[in-house]
Image (cartoon, coloured by chain):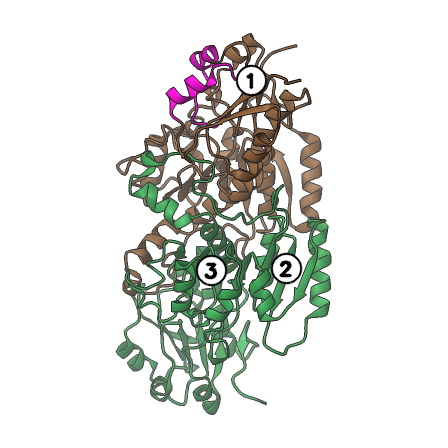
Chain colours: A green, B brown
Amino acid sequence: MATQKSKVVVTRDLGPDVLGKLREDPSVDLFVWPPDCGCDRNWLLEEAEGAVGLVVTLTDKVDEELLTRAGANLKVVSTMSVGYEHVDLAGLAKRGVRLGYTPDVLNGAVADLSIMLALMAGRNGGNALAHVRNGEWPNISWSPFGWCGPQLSGTVGGPKKTVGFLGFGRIAQVTLNRLVGFEITRCIYTTRIGSPPKKDLEDSLTEKHRRVNPGFEGVRQVDLKTLARESDVLFILAPGGAETRHIVNEELLREMKRTSVLVNTSRGSLVDSDALAKALREGWIWGAGLDVVEGEPDVTADHPLVKQPSCVIVPHIGSATFATRTDMANTAVANVLAVLSNKPMVSEKRVWQD
Amino acid sequence: MATQKSKVVVTRDLGPDVLGKLREDPSVDLFVWPPDCGCDRNWLLEEAEGAVGLVVTLTDKVDEELLTRAGANLKVVSTMSVGYEHVDLAGLAKRGVRLGYTPDVLNGAVADLSIMLALMAGRNGGNALAHVRNGEWPNISWSPFGWCGPQLSGTVGGPKKTVGFLGFGRIAQVTLNRLVGFEITRCIYTTRIGSPPKKDLEDSLTEKHRRVNPGFEGVRQVDLKTLARESDVLFILAPGGAETRHIVNEELLREMKRTSVLVNTSRGSLVDSDALAKALREGWIWGAGLDVVEGEPDVTADHPLVKQPSCVIVPHIGSATFATRTDMANTAVANVLAVLSNKPMVSEKRVWQD
């Protein structure tokens, strides 16, 4: 007896291994946008008709138009991302469509990139690289403090290092794990205004990191001004949205140390680009490392931050490793298959109240 | 009663704080090459006459000519560096002149840069940066595996990570301290051919790192071929000289994994540049991060490694942080003052046998 197959539409080629899990499932009728680049909107609108599941990415808008075209069969939207700004949550909720996403599996990749950007921004990484690529190494005359920057790790003459986190979720905590091996002495963080300190978490992290580094003084929640004033490196790892928009503004940047480094690997909207460009130009802080910029990808060569030599920018590659993207794709596919077989998703974002 | 002052010549402006220690010493008659860049050889030859101490850097040749010009008063050469390839050790030995140098204080800065280069080489750091600087971000179309590279840290789908060290001295061990926070699983190393495994060190490091990361399997000496075959990231941290020249050659590179990354922060002579360029061009390995290149600083834009997009090169800035260079300068000055007052140097390199 033939059972009706469930139509699943996937907006990117996720590779044979990952897609194989959908392809080999006898209950799935699979439609994949073939090239490994941006999915055509019209193709998606057409293919979505009658779909039970949609597997999408950050660049595919899941809005009223798409949901209407999909119709009453749609049970699940599964995004291969930790963010869901591109998804109309209310539209999903009113139709009873569930949302799968892929948090956690990308924490390590984003933490790695955060450390890379902190080091590059401190150690003149952008300029050093450009200098060699432009063939200017032969013209460098060695001098005791030439090419110097602030050091991420503790030193004989400067053993105290404070790292700060604006937002202290999972990625921040994994980043802190990395940093303890750099002999930092203290971690401070600020979370949502008015939220109580995570006392148990602070104690357990302090104890854990002291076992590695006996000089580690501890983890402590502080207010935003203290965070700006005391951080040698400040990592921005908070969610985007209206609540955090331009939380890194002129006022906050003016509080920071002249030798400090700012790293943003969360969302571009948290940082006021003009204020940061001014801070770098006028030397309020030492440097910045950015994986995200407000208005991306429309960030051109004449953008005020791109023009700052002390600003290191990479094009939103926080989760871009083969292993992590494969884990994300597998999670996105597993989320769809779970809904089709009435099992719990690996990672579900609740879109409505029970 | 006036005592004879000791002439001390310093080939670089080490800043007021550091030089103050020599300037304020009543027994010292100080001569400093004033600008903060390459010291003029003729100035040095002239000023060296009658000097008791010379404070030099890697770019000042301490050879027969200079030692002869200095004459019989010379007691100590103090180099602000961990290397001493620029110093004629036999010339010092036959005159009974002692050598001060500055190891250890730069370990942390070099370890930091090693991690930065490992991350940049893995994560397409050079190209990502150039892409944004050239205004090409708007043209990037998101794709699941676009901009991907191998991940330094362990992941859900790829939890096993082996880091390798060619040379396993102090800087390598500090670098390993940093890496344990990246959830690596195993460390292998190769030292001088025929040297026995450092069994006690292996055990103590394994125990220490397991306390941080219970999945850490251990530290183990292996032969060169195994090192090449099994390392996900291979750090070159061995001394230069004839014994290690081109130890990273075509044969070794052909053994490495296609996804592996090579990092050299020791001396350029250890790596055969043409072989590495070929390995990158033909995809034998994923990428390379270099702080040193054979023949530096004469590394121009048409150098085969500079032309490789997967090769990230910075101009020998391993120790270039304000804190570390200050510690190095202070050590170099303290070494001279120690000899003048008949005290043990902070760091002395023995140049003759007792």
Out of B46 and A188, give the one closest to the viewer.
Answer: B46
Residue A304, above or below B76 = below
**Type of residue at label 2?**
Cys
Residue in the picture at 66% in, 51% down: B213
Residue B52: give its label: 1
* Element type at mark 3: loop
* Element type at mark 1: loop
Residue in the picture at 48% in, 32% down: B266
Out of A74 and A189, give the one closest to the viewer.
Answer: A189
**Type of residue at label 1?**
Val
Give the magenta range.
Answer: B40-69
Quadrant in the rendering for residue B219: top right
What's the distance in space between the residues labelled 2 and 3, CA to CA?
Answer: 22 Å
Tell me the quarter of the image containing the N terminus of chain A: bottom left
The chain carrying label 3 is: A
Residue A280, above or below B309 = below
Q: Provide the residue designation for mark 2.
A: A187
- The residue most toward the top is B94
For label 3, the crowd category at 10 Å Cα-Cα, with few meaning under 14, some 14 to 19 and many 20 or more, is: some
Task: Indicate the position of residue A173 as horizontal and vertical percent values.
Answer: 60, 62
